[in-house]
Amino acid sequence: MPLMTLTPSQRLASVDDLLLYRLSQLTAAAGAVVVRLCEGGYGITRREWGLLAQLHGYPQGLLPSELADRMHRDRARTSRTITALLGKQLIERTTLPHDRRSVRVSLTREGQALYAQLMPQIQHINSQILSVLSHDEAASLDDALERLRVQALAVQVSMSPDLPKADRRRGRAVSALVTSPTRPQA
């Protein structure tokens, strides 16, 4: 009987086999092209492009908190990106009449024009990357990505109560990580 060779996703023997690491490698390689296009060609960061792309299709605009949620970013980082795009006159803020403390953010005409120029190029990059897959493989990838997203959310919910809160400013003692109930003891 022939031995079955395990795939990296089945093996998980090193960091190079881990799904999230492999996805980050793909994102880094593909993202480098997008970064050069955005920064070199249009003077915006990839994060700024993401915010512009999220605003497209919402002529009435979105609340900054909605943008943060849609982009899966924290509100402080989203606020900094909004400030940068306001300075570049690609977005505008509109105060809500019923709540003067709240604002909606929307694309300016310049922001809409930039989206119209950049989106087809970003789509082309994605199309080139996906061109190595057959139609059936692309459909399987889409299905697998959605199932993985749903499973990741389920894992997040199930593990959340056991995981310590992040505190990047202070750091965390190594001993606290080793004795965490979700990690094996050293």
Image: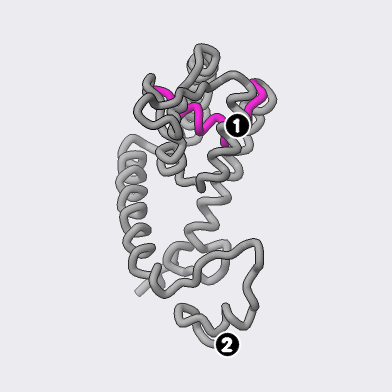
- The alpha-carbon separation of the residues under discs 2 and 1 comes to 45 Å
- Residue at x 64% of width, y 24% of height: 87
**Label at residue 121:** none
Seen in the picture, residue 113 relative to 46 is either above or below; the reply is: above
Q: Quadrant of the C terminus?
A: bottom right
Give the magenta range: 42-57
Residue contact between numbered discs 2 and 1, judged by CB atoms under 8 Å: no
Would residue 79 appear left or right of 71 to someone viewing this image? right
Q: Is 129 in front, or is 43?
A: 43
The 10 Å Cα crowd at callout 2, few under 14, some 14 to 19, many 20 or more, is few
| Residue to which mark 1 is pinned | 83
- Residue at x 42% of width, y 23% of height: 56
The 10 Å Cα crowd at callout 1, few under 14, some 14 to 19, many 20 or more, is some
* Residue closest to the far bottom: 186
Residue 167 at x, y percent in the picture: 58, 65
> Is tag 2's residue or tag 1's residue first in the polypeptide sequence?
1
Q: Is 171 in front, or is 137?
A: 171
Seen in the picture, residue 133 relative to 178 is either above or below; the reply is: above
Residue 99 picture quarter: top left
Identified by mark 2, the residue type is Ala
Identified by mark 1, the residue type is Thr
- Residue at x 51% of width, y 48% of height: 74
Would residue 113 appear left or right of 88 to someone viewing this image? left
For the stretch drawn in magenta, the main secondary structure is helix
Q: Is 89 in front, or is 9?
A: 89
Residue 23 at x, y percent in the picture: 51, 51
| Residue to which mark 2 is pinned | 186
Residue 106 picture quarter: top left
Q: Quadrant of the N terminus?
A: bottom left
Depth check, mark 2 against mark 1: the one in front is 1
- Residue at x 66% of width, y 21% of height: 41
